[in-house]
Amino acid sequence: MSNDPMYIHNQFAQVNKRIKNAALACGRDAEHIQLLAVSKTKPVSNIISAYEYGHRSFAENYVQEAVDKIQALDQYSDITWHFIGPLQSNKSKFIAEYFAWMHSLDRIKIAQRLNQQRSVYQPKLMVCVQVNIDNEPNKAGVAANEVIDFIDELQQFDRLCCRGIMSIPKATSNETERAASFANMQDLFEQCKARFDSIDTLSMGMSADLELAVAHGTTMVRIGTDLFGKRET
Ligand SMILES: *Cc1c(COP(=O)(O)O)cnc(C)c1O
Protein backbone atom coordinates (compact mmCIF):
# COMPACT_ATOMS: atom_id res chain seq x y z
CA MET A 1 0.00 0.00 0.00
CA SER A 2 2.79 2.42 0.88
CA ASN A 3 4.19 1.77 -2.61
CA ASP A 4 1.06 3.24 -4.14
CA PRO A 5 1.69 6.79 -5.46
CA MET A 6 -1.83 7.79 -4.37
CA TYR A 7 -1.02 6.74 -0.80
CA ILE A 8 2.11 8.90 -0.80
CA HIS A 9 0.34 11.88 -2.37
CA ASN A 10 -2.34 11.62 0.27
CA GLN A 11 0.23 11.43 3.08
CA PHE A 12 1.98 14.55 1.76
CA ALA A 13 -1.32 16.43 1.63
CA GLN A 14 -2.06 15.42 5.23
CA VAL A 15 1.35 16.36 6.58
CA ASN A 16 1.22 19.72 4.77
CA LYS A 17 -2.18 20.28 6.34
CA ARG A 18 -0.81 19.41 9.80
CA ILE A 19 1.97 21.99 9.32
CA LYS A 20 -0.58 24.63 8.26
CA ASN A 21 -2.86 23.90 11.21
CA ALA A 22 0.00 23.84 13.70
CA ALA A 23 1.27 27.16 12.36
CA LEU A 24 -2.20 28.65 12.52
CA ALA A 25 -2.60 27.46 16.12
CA CYS A 26 0.43 29.47 17.26
CA GLY A 27 0.14 32.43 14.91
CA ARG A 28 3.05 31.48 12.65
CA ASP A 29 3.26 31.62 8.87
CA ALA A 30 3.42 28.07 7.49
CA GLU A 31 5.59 29.42 4.67
CA HIS A 32 8.42 29.66 7.20
CA ILE A 33 8.32 25.94 7.92
CA GLN A 34 9.99 23.72 5.36
CA LEU A 35 9.11 20.05 5.04
CA LEU A 36 11.99 17.62 4.58
CA ALA A 37 10.88 14.20 3.39
CA VAL A 38 12.98 11.55 5.12
CA SER A 39 13.27 8.77 2.56
CA LYS A 40 15.77 6.49 4.34
CA THR A 41 15.18 2.76 3.70
CA LYS A 42 12.46 3.64 1.17
CA PRO A 43 12.81 2.81 -2.54
CA VAL A 44 13.56 5.30 -5.29
CA SER A 45 10.01 4.76 -6.59
CA ASN A 46 8.66 6.39 -3.41
CA ILE A 47 10.86 9.42 -3.94
CA ILE A 48 9.60 9.70 -7.51
CA SER A 49 5.99 9.56 -6.25
CA ALA A 50 6.76 12.41 -3.87
CA TYR A 51 8.51 14.30 -6.65
CA GLU A 52 5.48 13.93 -8.89
CA TYR A 53 3.37 15.30 -6.06
CA GLY A 54 5.63 18.36 -6.29
CA HIS A 55 8.01 17.74 -3.42
CA ARG A 56 11.71 18.60 -3.88
CA SER A 57 13.53 18.31 -0.53
CA PHE A 58 14.62 14.88 0.65
CA ALA A 59 16.72 13.67 3.57
CA GLU A 60 18.77 10.50 3.93
CA ASN A 61 20.65 8.88 6.84
CA TYR A 62 22.96 6.25 5.41
CA VAL A 63 25.78 7.32 3.10
CA GLN A 64 25.94 4.36 0.72
CA GLU A 65 22.16 4.05 0.37
CA ALA A 66 21.90 7.79 -0.20
CA VAL A 67 24.59 7.92 -2.88
CA ASP A 68 22.96 5.01 -4.74
CA LYS A 69 19.61 6.81 -4.74
CA ILE A 70 21.04 10.19 -5.68
CA GLN A 71 22.83 8.61 -8.64
CA ALA A 72 19.68 6.74 -9.67
CA LEU A 73 17.76 10.04 -9.56
CA ASP A 74 20.43 11.99 -11.40
CA GLN A 75 17.99 13.42 -13.95
CA TYR A 76 15.82 14.91 -11.17
CA SER A 77 18.30 17.73 -10.90
CA ASP A 78 16.07 20.10 -8.92
CA ILE A 79 15.93 17.81 -5.88
CA THR A 80 17.72 19.21 -2.82
CA TRP A 81 19.43 16.46 -0.82
CA HIS A 82 19.94 16.73 2.93
CA PHE A 83 22.12 14.41 4.98
CA ILE A 84 20.76 13.87 8.52
CA GLY A 85 22.53 10.72 9.75
CA PRO A 86 25.66 10.04 11.73
CA LEU A 87 28.82 10.42 9.63
CA GLN A 88 32.16 8.63 9.91
CA SER A 89 34.95 10.94 8.84
CA ASN A 90 36.18 8.53 6.14
CA LYS A 91 32.84 8.94 4.31
CA SER A 92 32.80 12.73 4.36
CA LYS A 93 33.78 13.05 0.70
CA PHE A 94 30.44 11.57 -0.34
CA ILE A 95 28.60 14.22 1.63
CA ALA A 96 30.78 16.95 0.13
CA GLU A 97 30.17 15.63 -3.35
CA TYR A 98 26.47 14.73 -3.33
CA PHE A 99 24.61 16.82 -0.78
CA ALA A 100 23.40 20.40 -0.52
CA TRP A 101 22.87 20.22 3.25
CA MET A 102 24.41 18.37 6.18
CA HIS A 103 22.38 18.53 9.43
CA SER A 104 24.43 16.34 11.75
CA LEU A 105 27.71 18.23 12.05
CA ASP A 106 29.15 17.88 15.54
CA ARG A 107 32.92 17.62 15.09
CA ILE A 108 35.39 20.23 13.83
CA LYS A 109 37.49 17.48 12.25
CA ILE A 110 34.54 16.56 10.00
CA ALA A 111 33.92 20.22 9.17
CA GLN A 112 37.56 20.54 8.14
CA ARG A 113 37.31 17.53 5.84
CA LEU A 114 34.01 18.67 4.30
CA ASN A 115 35.52 22.10 3.70
CA GLN A 116 38.53 20.60 1.90
CA GLN A 117 36.40 18.21 -0.11
CA ARG A 118 33.68 20.64 -1.21
CA SER A 119 34.49 21.68 -4.75
CA VAL A 120 34.77 25.37 -5.57
CA TYR A 121 32.50 24.64 -8.55
CA GLN A 122 29.65 23.72 -6.21
CA PRO A 123 27.64 26.05 -3.98
CA LYS A 124 28.84 26.08 -0.38
CA LEU A 125 27.72 23.14 1.71
CA MET A 126 24.91 24.25 4.03
CA VAL A 127 25.42 22.85 7.52
CA CYS A 128 23.51 22.63 10.77
CA VAL A 129 25.18 21.84 14.07
CA GLN A 130 23.65 18.87 15.82
CA VAL A 131 22.97 19.68 19.46
CA ASN A 132 22.75 17.11 22.24
CA ILE A 133 20.06 19.19 23.86
CA ASP A 134 19.17 16.74 26.63
CA ASN A 135 22.82 15.99 27.50
CA GLU A 136 22.28 12.31 26.86
CA PRO A 137 25.35 10.14 27.33
CA ASN A 138 26.42 8.35 24.11
CA LYS A 139 24.30 10.65 21.98
CA ALA A 140 25.74 12.58 19.06
CA GLY A 141 25.79 16.35 19.16
CA VAL A 142 27.55 19.36 20.62
CA ALA A 143 26.60 20.34 24.18
CA ALA A 144 24.26 23.33 24.21
CA ASN A 145 26.71 25.53 26.10
CA GLU A 146 29.41 24.87 23.48
CA VAL A 147 27.36 25.59 20.38
CA ILE A 148 28.25 29.29 20.02
CA ASP A 149 31.99 28.53 20.24
CA PHE A 150 31.57 25.68 17.79
CA ILE A 151 29.86 27.94 15.24
CA ASP A 152 32.58 30.53 15.83
CA GLU A 153 35.14 27.92 14.80
CA LEU A 154 33.16 27.05 11.69
CA GLN A 155 33.66 30.60 10.39
CA GLN A 156 37.18 29.65 9.20
CA PHE A 157 35.74 27.21 6.62
CA ASP A 158 34.88 29.11 3.46
CA ARG A 159 33.24 26.18 1.62
CA LEU A 160 30.70 25.73 4.43
CA CYS A 161 27.85 27.98 5.45
CA CYS A 162 26.43 27.42 8.91
CA ARG A 163 22.66 27.78 8.61
CA GLY A 164 21.50 26.62 12.02
CA ILE A 165 21.09 23.94 14.62
CA MET A 166 19.45 20.52 14.66
CA SER A 167 18.31 18.15 17.37
CA ILE A 168 16.84 14.71 17.80
CA PRO A 169 14.75 14.66 20.96
CA LYS A 170 15.28 12.15 23.71
CA ALA A 171 13.12 9.07 23.33
CA THR A 172 10.52 9.85 25.95
CA SER A 173 6.76 9.75 26.12
CA ASN A 174 6.84 12.58 28.65
CA GLU A 175 5.32 15.59 26.84
CA THR A 176 6.55 18.08 29.44
CA GLU A 177 10.14 16.89 29.14
CA ARG A 178 9.98 16.99 25.39
CA ALA A 179 8.47 20.47 25.36
CA ALA A 180 11.25 21.62 27.68
CA SER A 181 14.00 20.40 25.35
CA PHE A 182 12.25 21.99 22.34
CA ALA A 183 12.01 25.24 24.30
CA ASN A 184 15.75 25.00 25.05
CA MET A 185 16.46 24.53 21.35
CA GLN A 186 14.31 27.53 20.49
CA ASP A 187 16.19 29.61 23.03
CA LEU A 188 19.56 28.49 21.68
CA PHE A 189 18.39 29.20 18.12
CA GLU A 190 17.55 32.79 19.12
CA GLN A 191 21.02 33.21 20.64
CA CYS A 192 22.71 31.84 17.52
CA LYS A 193 20.63 34.05 15.22
CA ALA A 194 21.50 37.13 17.24
CA ARG A 195 25.18 36.32 16.94
CA PHE A 196 25.63 35.00 13.36
CA ASP A 197 24.06 36.49 10.22
CA SER A 198 23.97 33.17 8.34
CA ILE A 199 21.72 31.42 10.87
CA ASP A 200 18.08 30.98 9.84
CA THR A 201 17.37 27.28 10.35
CA LEU A 202 16.04 25.35 13.30
CA SER A 203 15.93 21.71 12.14
CA MET A 204 13.60 20.06 14.63
CA GLY A 205 10.46 17.92 14.61
CA MET A 206 9.69 14.42 13.32
CA SER A 207 6.45 12.52 12.67
CA ALA A 208 5.52 12.17 16.33
CA ASP A 209 6.28 15.73 17.43
CA LEU A 210 5.70 17.92 14.39
CA GLU A 211 3.09 20.11 16.13
CA LEU A 212 5.24 20.61 19.23
CA ALA A 213 8.20 21.58 17.04
CA VAL A 214 6.11 24.14 15.13
CA ALA A 215 4.95 25.63 18.44
CA HIS A 216 8.63 25.98 19.40
CA GLY A 217 9.76 27.81 16.31
CA THR A 218 11.04 25.06 14.03
CA THR A 219 11.85 26.14 10.46
CA MET A 220 12.49 22.64 9.06
CA VAL A 221 10.65 19.48 10.06
CA ARG A 222 12.10 16.09 9.11
CA ILE A 223 9.26 13.67 8.44
CA GLY A 224 9.63 10.03 7.40
CA THR A 225 7.01 7.66 8.76
CA ASP A 226 4.00 9.92 8.27
CA LEU A 227 4.91 10.51 4.60
CA PHE A 228 6.12 7.11 3.42
CA GLY A 229 4.67 4.70 5.99
CA LYS A 230 6.42 2.66 8.63
CA ARG A 231 9.97 1.53 7.95
CA GLU A 232 10.79 -2.18 7.96
CA THR A 233 14.02 -1.75 9.91
C1 LIG B 1 14.49 8.86 10.68
C2 LIG B 1 14.72 10.27 11.07
C3 LIG B 1 13.70 11.22 10.97
C4 LIG B 1 12.27 10.88 10.57
O1 LIG B 1 11.63 10.24 11.61
P1 LIG B 1 10.06 9.80 11.52
O2 LIG B 1 9.71 9.53 12.92
O3 LIG B 1 10.01 8.59 10.66
O4 LIG B 1 9.32 10.94 10.95
C5 LIG B 1 14.01 12.53 11.28
N1 LIG B 1 15.26 12.89 11.67
C6 LIG B 1 16.26 12.01 11.77
C7 LIG B 1 17.61 12.47 12.19
C8 LIG B 1 16.02 10.67 11.49
O5 LIG B 1 17.03 9.79 11.62
Image (cartoon, rainbow, N blue to C red):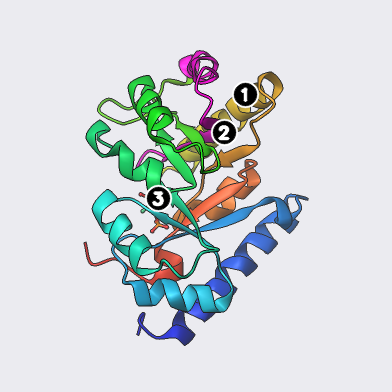
Circle 3 sits on which residue?
Answer: 98
| Residues rendered magenta in the picture | 145-173
The amino acid beneath tag 2 is Gly
Local secondary structure at mark 2: strand
Give the class, few, some or many, for how many residues have Cα within 10 Å of label 1's Cα (few <14, many ≥20).
many
Pinpoint residue 81: horizontal percent, then vertical percent.
46, 54
169 lies above or below 3: above
Tag 2 or tag 1, which sits nearer the N-term? Answer: 2
The reply to whether the C-beta atoms of the residues labelled 2 and 3 are less than 8 Å apart is: no
Pinpoint residue 181: horizontal percent, then vertical percent.
50, 33
91 lies above or below 80: above
Q: Residue at x 51, y 31 (%)?
A: 160
Label drawn at residue 67: none
Tag 3 or tag 2, which sits nearer the N-term? Answer: 3
Residue 43 in sight in this render: yes
Label drawn at residue 192: 1
Q: Is residue 33 left or right of residue 57?
A: right
144 lies above or below 15: above
The reply to whether the C-beta atoms of the residues labelled 1 and 2 are less than 8 Å apart is: yes
Tag 3 or tag 1, which sits nearer the N-term? Answer: 3
Local secondary structure at mark 1: helix
Residue 168 within the segment the image draws in magenta:
yes
